[in-house]
Image (spheres, rainbow, N blue to C red):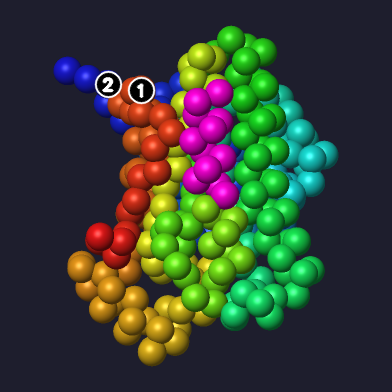
Amino acid sequence: MGASAKLDGKVAIVTGASRGIGEAIARGMAEAGASVVVAARKIDGLASVAQSIGDNALAVAAHTGREDDVKALVAAAVARFGKVDVLVNNAATNPYFGPMIDVDMGAWDKTFEVNVKGYFMMAREVARHLRERNAPGAIVNITSVAGLVASPFQGVYSMTKAAVISMTKTLAYELAASNIRVNAIAPGFVDTKFASAVLKNDALLDEVIKRTPQRRYAQPSEIAGGAVYLASDAASYVTGHTLVIDGGMTL
């Protein structure tokens, strides 16, 4: 019998974990046996998530687009739990909704800083830590179906998510010899504050439902299972893969 999707004895960092998909993944990791470091830019809300998970959780405020914060986050995880085995890159931003050619370059820079630079710096810091320990590990990047198909009015965000998929593949190749697996998850529409611009607009929501064979959008907990699987030994031969969880939207 193969390995189960358990994380007993593992330590996981989950960014963007104060709510939504990140919070659900953090809870899923803890339920699977991991100690969890939950991170977000602001401690408000984050501390209550960690408290509700229990003694095996730590809340750390960090802006993952800033290298000093990234280093401090990993250091805090090691100081509390002794190591890091799993990274879930989930923190993201989408400050602009509209035609690509009209985007303000400040919004462009902010989107790439968090969604691409932040993911890369977190992955690099955790990979370096794993290599120093000569330990296996898993990195899971939360991307989006927006990185796979044309996404009108979300073009800049979509470019960052496509970049994350490319980053995932190359890191998976380069880190395989170190027994570090790198995978991604591309959710469809999920019931989160992040997706509220679409889900609270009846016309846009109707279009989403029409394009989704299951005729609904997801709950954050439906994404968490995929992250736990990819982080666990059950996925020991899976790397460089993007797991699409979208109710069939991209079929």
* Relative depth, front residue between 242 and 222: 242
Mark 2 or 1, nearer chain start: 2
Question: Where on the picture, by quarter, is residue 155?
Answer: bottom right
Which class describes the residues within 10 Å of circle 1: few (<14), some (14-19), or many (20+)? some
Q: Amino acid at mark 1?
A: Ser
Q: Which residues are magenta?
A: 163-174
Q: Quadrant of the N terminus?
A: top left
Amino acid residing under circle 2: Ala
Task: Give the answer, above or below, for where 124 lies relative to 175.
Answer: below
Asked if the stretch drawn in magenta spans residue 88, the answer is: no
Q: Depth check: give the residue in front, 23 or 235.
A: 235
Q: Which residue is mark 2?
A: 3
Q: Are marks 2 and 1 in contact (CB under 8 Å)?
A: yes
Q: Looking at the image, which residue is at 31% across and 26% down?
A: 234
Measured Cα–Cα span from mark 2 to mark 1: 8 Å
Which residue corresponds to mark 1?
Answer: 236
